[in-house]
Image (tube, grey):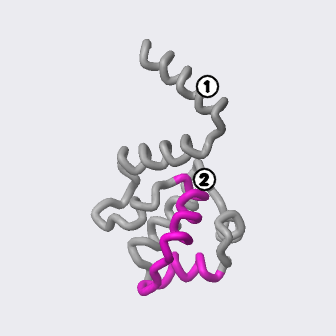
Amino acid sequence: MASKLGDKLRSCRKSPNINLTLDEVARRAGVSKSYLWELENRESLSPSAEKLQAIATVLQQDPSFFLDDSVDTPQETHKDKEFFRSYSQLDTEAKAKLRQILEVLKKT
């Protein structure tokens, strides 16, 4: 029987904007396909923070979403945290361009 974590992982992985196979997520996250399958399908497994972060990054989610059993779909706060995490990894030039885009959007 799958856990809440497993259901969320599978749902995100198969969502239209991600749509990745177990193989693809596992390869990108640096985990084995069998480990990812176990996370999706077994009740008792809990990933390390490092592995959860890697998987969450591939699935474009904040890791806190997967740990919060009170929600089934990502909330705005989860999306904001993942956006900031992605922004933090950009180079200086890309950050400047994104800030310019934000200023334009704020004016509309």
Numbered-mark total:
2
Mark 2 crowdedness (10 Å alpha carbons): few <14, some 14-19, many ≥20: some
Which residue lies at the image location 53% right of the left edge and 61% below the top edge? 56
- Compared with residue 12, is residue 108 higher up or lower down, i.e. above or below? above
The span picked out in magenta is 34-60
Looking at the picture, how far across and down is residue 42, in whole percent? 48, 84
Mark 1 crowdedness (10 Å alpha carbons): few <14, some 14-19, many ≥20: few
Looking at the picture, how far across and down is residue 52, in whole percent? 51, 68
The answer for how far apart the CA atoms under marks 2 and 1 are is 25 Å
| 2 or 1: tag closer to the N-terminus | 2
Looking at the picture, how far across and down is residue 99, in whole percent? 53, 25
Which residue lies at the image location 38% right of the left edge and 67% below the top edge? 67
Residue 36: in magenta span: yes
Residue type for callout 2: Ile
- Compared with residue 12, is residue 44 higher up or lower down, i.e. above or below? below
Which residue is more in the foreground, 98 or 56?
98
Q: Which mark is residue 97?
A: 1
Which residue position holds label 2? Answer: 18
Mark 2 against mark 1, which lies toward the viewer? 1
Residue 68: in magenta span: no
Residue type for callout 1: Lys
Magenta stretch secondary structure, dominant: helix
Element carrying mark 2: loop
Relative horizontal placement of residue 31, taking residue 38 as reference (left or right): right
Which residue lies at the image location 67% right of the left edge and 78% below the top edge? 32
